[in-house]
């Protein structure tokens, strides 16, 4: 059996392809993830939303569609932070009742992003949420 090693470029191409797939939006809300390097923290602001009949996230107060690529002035419901991806996952998925994440694929995405953020925090590279 021959096993071919993947290069960094191969892995990046797989990730890039998968990042373009369709995903259903979580009616439990969404998270904006960023680093607080001064305090050594991974931060995740949780925002609520409503999913309309078209599958778009809308602001529960205004009914307006929340754009995915533009900066939107909204107030987060909760700010979660932790020094590691695991600590942040425990705070969000185990200590919140009810859990603000209602879809398993959203939970998996957040776990991946928190690990990416943790690595960026440790290595000093820039972190940009996927």
Image (cartoon, rainbow, N blue to C red):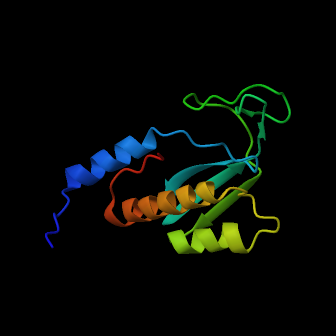
Q: Residue at coordinates 48% horizontally, 60% vertically from top-left?
A: 112
On screen, 102 above or below 74? below
In-image side of 105 versus 130 (left or right): right
On screen, 115 above or below 18? below
Pick the front one: 98 or 25 = 25
Q: Residue at coordinates 45% horizontally, 64% vertically from top-left?
A: 115
Quarter of the image where one finds residue 18:
top left
Q: Residue furthest right?
A: 61
Q: Residue at coordinates 44% horizontally, 43% vertically from top-left?
A: 19
Quadrant showing the N terminus:
bottom left
Q: Residue furthest left?
A: 2
Q: Is residue 61 visible?
A: yes
Q: Residue furthest top?
A: 64
Q: Residue at coordinates 59% horizontally, 68% vertically from top-left?
A: 88
Q: How many marks?
A: 0
Residue 65 image position (x, y, % from top left): 72, 27
In-image side of 1 versus 58 (left or right): left
In-image side of 93 versus 129 (left or right): right
On screen, 78 above or below 32? below
Residue 56 image position (x, y, % from top left): 70, 32
Q: Is residue 39 visible?
A: no
Residue 41 image position (x, y, % from top left): 52, 64
Pick the front one: 49 or 17 = 17
């Amino acid at each position: 059996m021959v096993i071919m090693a993947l290069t960094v470029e191969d892995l990046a191409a797989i990730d890039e392809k998968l990042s373009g797939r369709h995903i259903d939006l979580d009616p439990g809300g969404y998270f904006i993830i960023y680093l607080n390097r001064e305090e050594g923290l991974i931060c995740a602001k949780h925002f609520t939303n409503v999913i309309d009949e078209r599958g778009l996230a809308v602001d529960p107060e205004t009914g307006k569609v929340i754009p995915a690529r533009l900066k939107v002035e909204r107030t987060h419901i909760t700010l979660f932070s932790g020094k590691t991806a695991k600590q942040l996952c425990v705070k969000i998925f185990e200590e919140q009742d009810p859990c603000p994440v209602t879809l398993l694929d959203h939970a998996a995405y957040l776990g991946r992003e928190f690990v990416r953020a943790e690595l960026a925090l440790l290595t000093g590279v820039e972190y940009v949420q996927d």
